[in-house]
Amino acid sequence: MPKSLTPSVRRQIAEFDPLSADGPSVSEFCQRLGISRPSFYNIRRRFLQEGNKALNPRSSAPKNPVRTFDQNTTNIVLRIRTRLEKEGWDSGPKSIWFAGIDTGEFGQPVPSVATIARILSAAGAVKANPRKRPRTAWPRFARSAAMEMWQLDALEYRLADETGTKVTIYQLLDDSTRFDVGTRCCPDPENGTDAIATLRAAFTDHGVPRELLSDNGRAFNQARHGIVSGTERFLADHGCLGISGRGYHPQTQGKNEPSHQTLRRFLEANAPASLEGLTTLIADFRNYYNYRRRHQALPGAMTPGQAWEAAEHRPSDRTPISHKELQARADSYRDKTLAQRAAAAPDGDIQDLTRATPAAPETEPRVPTGGRLRDAAADLIVVTRGNPQIYFQGLKIMIPSNLAGTYQMISTENDYSMFDTTTGIESIYFPLPIRPAVTRHIFPLWQVSGARVRDQKPDWTDKQRTYMKKNNPEES
């Protein structure tokens, strides 16, 4: 902190006459006193406004000193946190602050979010989450009005019965207000019939949106594969256009993943053992989520129900969309894909690519039989803390243990990436072909040229830099 000017120096500044014929200029005067021109003008301006008060520096004491709360406040904070965790809801400082205000448990003065965070930290009740990025790092994108677009996604859930029966939950949210318009569960694997039933029920309750965003799964939208699915035709008949995110780009559906986390946390806290129990819990979840739980991504941390009521609604006019238009869009995606492949393929392989046109879809979506969900896709990778490594082309690559989780692997001729299936964030990347400085069957990822990881620790970066400087000077 710079040292404050003495009263005598301040007096000289206040009495200085820049118009004196024999006197120095302002710059020369400031240079003589060892001060800056902004300081000179600030002190003179303050002297004109406050008089002799300007001869002394302003107090540096904080305008709002930190309050000290008693043990009772600490007990209330910890009690609210315990209750929220037991019920399966968010239990961070801001969630505790909202819950304490809504229930009237906090007296006056109400502790701030920062104070609650300090209380939790002092009590050792903070869960370290180094993977979490600051909210300012997440650009928010959303439609400006309700009913302009809904988002549909499915997640797999195991019941708490003896066999751990797998069921499918279809989560359906309004993009603008995050209002849950029709989450429901079904006993069968993800399929178009159940997806259509979910949409039909939501259309009956709330109307038809203009667009529906989903992934490129067989149950939802196959336009990017050159096929028109039964779900897309159902939407078109009701005047709603089905759209999907770009392939291998999970960030498009990234907003759904936090909602999945919230739902899973609630269900795991209540452990339903039957489909009927799960249905009841989902109804309870929707009521609390829509009308009681504050959504921190909404303006003023409103509940989704408040946002839904306050927002302008722009539903579809229900004019059917021609199936020919859907097929033309699917054909356009297919032609673009074939052109890209042909441009990258040898001349002799172009004819083979043109024969890769997808087969026509079935008239009605087929429901898988047997009541068991399929195994995880081959491009899903699970990394555990006890075995933090990945396998690629016969090589075993060690990664930081804090990257434990489930990832979607995407590999091209030039790149290898792993995206977190929960947040959609790229967590691991390295260029191909793989080029460790010293080729061995097993080695750490920091030995791979051009590798990077999410939340890169300083020691990891230092190891990589030192290793590359020694073994690959041209790469460092």
Image: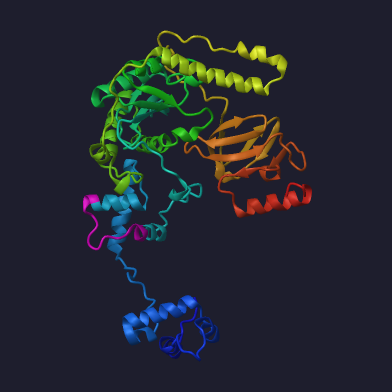
Instruction: Please tell me whether residue 38 is drawn above or below residue 53 in the rendered image.
Output: above
Residue under the image location 47 percent in, 75 percent down: 38
* Residue 110 is covered by the magenta coloring: yes
Mark yes or no: residue 58 visible. Answer: no
Judging depth in this view, the residue of 240 and 97 nearest the camera is: 240
Residue drawn at 32 percent across, 59 percent down? 112
Quarter-of-image position of residue 409: top right
Let me know if residue 259 is in the magenta part.
no
What residue range appears in magenta?
A: 102-116
User: Is any part of residue 61 visible from this angle?
Assistant: yes
Residue 359 in the image, given as x and y percentages of width and height: 52, 9
In the image, taking residue 391 as reference, residue 471 lies left or right, namely right
Q: Main secondary structure of the magenta part?
A: loop
Residue 13, position in %: x, y? 44, 86
Q: Residue at x 36, y 79 (%)?
A: 46
- At 30% from the left edge and 53% from the top edge, which residue is drawn? 97
